[in-house]
Image (cartoon, rainbow, N blue to C red):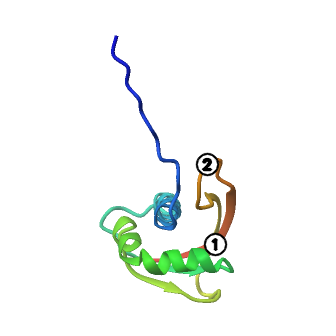
């Protein structure tokens, strides 16, 4: 009989948390693209508004990845603009550290222009 010991590192770093939050945001944006009837050839411009400074910092740090994953040409973080239709997105992230991880609620408004 062979015994195997497996150890899992459940520590969530700031970088890992940010990547997870950006992934959730990209999934939401791509769902919006589908809902709006956009196809893969359509490029969009993204507008974000949020009081969540940490989420805004994540968007700034991972801007290139978000642009690529959502087929976007530009990304702007601005206060609400009346000429843009915004979609509210509320999702749950996790806090850094060891498990069990505390869940953090993020709220952001996403505007898309084609």
Which quadrant of the structure image shows residue 71?
bottom left
Q: Is residue 114 visible?
A: no
Left/right placement of residue 31 relative to residue 1 reads right
Q: Residue at x 61, y 57 (%)?
A: 94
Which quadrant of the structure image shows residue 84?
bottom right
State the residue lying farthest toward the left: 41
Left/right placement of residue 77 relative to residue 53 reads left
Which quadrant of the structure image shows residue 48?
bottom right
In the picture, which quadrant includes the N terminus?
Answer: top left
Give SS at disc 1. strand
Residue 10 lies, with reference to residue 40, above or below; the image says above
Q: Is residue 50 visible?
A: yes
Q: Residue at x 68, y 61 (%)?
A: 104
Between 108 and 42, the residue placed more toward the observer is 108
First along the sequence among labels 2 and 1 = 2
Left/right placement of residue 36 relative to residue 103 reads left
Left/right placement of residue 63 relative to residue 52 reads left
In the rendered image, which residue does mark 1 sit on?
A: 108
Q: Residues within 10 Å of mark 1 (few under 14, many from 20)?
A: some
Between 82 and 28, the residue placed more toward the observer is 28
In the rendered image, which residue does mark 2 sit on?
A: 99
Residue 45 in the image, given as x and y percentages of width and height: 43, 80
Give SS at disc 2. loop
Q: Which callout, 2 or 1, points to the residue nearer the camera?
A: 2
Q: Residue at x 52, y 53 (%)?
A: 11
**Cα distance between the residues tagged 2 and 1:** 26 Å
């Amino acid at each position: 009989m062979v015994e195997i010991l497996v150890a899992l590192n459940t520590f969530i770093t700031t970088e890992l948390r940010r990547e997870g939050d950006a992934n959730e945001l990209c999934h939401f944006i791509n769902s919006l693209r589908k809902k709006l009837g956009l196809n893969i050839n359509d490029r969009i411009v993204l507008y974000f508004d949020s009081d969540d400074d940490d989420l805004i910092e994540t968007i700034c740090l991972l801007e290139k990845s978000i642009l690529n994953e959502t087929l976007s040409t530009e990304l702007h973080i601005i206060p609400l603009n009346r000429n843009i239709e915004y979609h509210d997105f509320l999702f749950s992230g996790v806090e850094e550290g060891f498990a069990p991880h505390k869940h953090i609620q993020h709220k952001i408004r996403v505007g898309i222009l084609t």
